[in-house]
Every structure is written in C-alpha cells, then in structure tokens.
Image: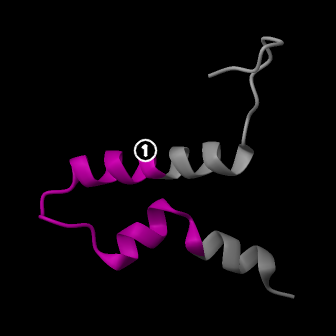
C-alpha cells in the first residue's frame, strides 16, 4: 500500500534482491539439469566480481 501522499517508498536492497532472484530463475530455466551448480550460481550472482572489487 502506498503512503497517503501518493509517493512510493523504494527499498533499494529489496529491489536488488528481487533482481538477483529473477536472474537465478532465468538461469535455472535455461539449464538442462535439475539444479544450478554452485559455480553457475556464483556466476549468475556475480560473486567473483564483488570479491575482485573488494580486494586491495
């Protein structure tokens, strides 16, 4: 439900999580196996990219 003033409140963390879930769903629907491998999940969620950015 939107606030009375008509402005929507956006939770950027929640929106980012929804986007990542969508990416996982798309990747899962494109895979031939029953499950995504841990490496594929990391690739979809760009885990390695975050680690590279955090490195000194």
Residue at (69%, 51%) from the top-left corner? 13
Q: Nearer the viewer, residue 54 or 18?
A: 18
- Whether the magenta-drawn stretch holds residue 27 is answered as yes
Give the percent coordinates (x, y) of residue 46.
56, 65
Residue 19 percent coordinates (x, y): 53, 44
Q: Main secondary structure of the magenta part?
A: helix
Identify the residue at the far bottom of this view: 56
Q: Is residue 2 rendered to the left or right of residue 23? A: right
All told, the count of numbered labels is 1
Could you tell me residue 5's position as x and y percent? 83, 12
| Dot 1 alpha-carbon crowd within 10 angstroms: few under 14, some 14 to 19, many 20 or more | few
Q: Quadrant of the C terminus?
A: bottom right
Residue drawn at (78%, 11%) of the image? 6
Per the rendered image, the range of residues in magenta is 21-47
> What residue lies at 26% left-to-right and 54% top-to-bottom?
28
Residue reaching furthest front?
4
Colour setting: one colour
Task: Decide which of 15, 50 is in the foreground and name it.
Answer: 15
21 sits left or right of 29 in the view: right
Mark 1 highlights which residue? 22
Does residue 25 lie above or below 51 as drawn?
above
Q: Residue at x 63, y 48 (%)?
A: 14
């Amino acid at each position: 439900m939107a606030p009375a003033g008509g402005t929507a409140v956006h939770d950027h963390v929640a929106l980012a999580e929804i986007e990542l879930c969508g990416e996982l769903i798309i990747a899962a629907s494109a895979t031939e196996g029953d499950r995504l491998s841990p490496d594929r999940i990391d690739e979809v969620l760009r885990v390695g990219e975050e680690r590279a950015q955090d490195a000194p």
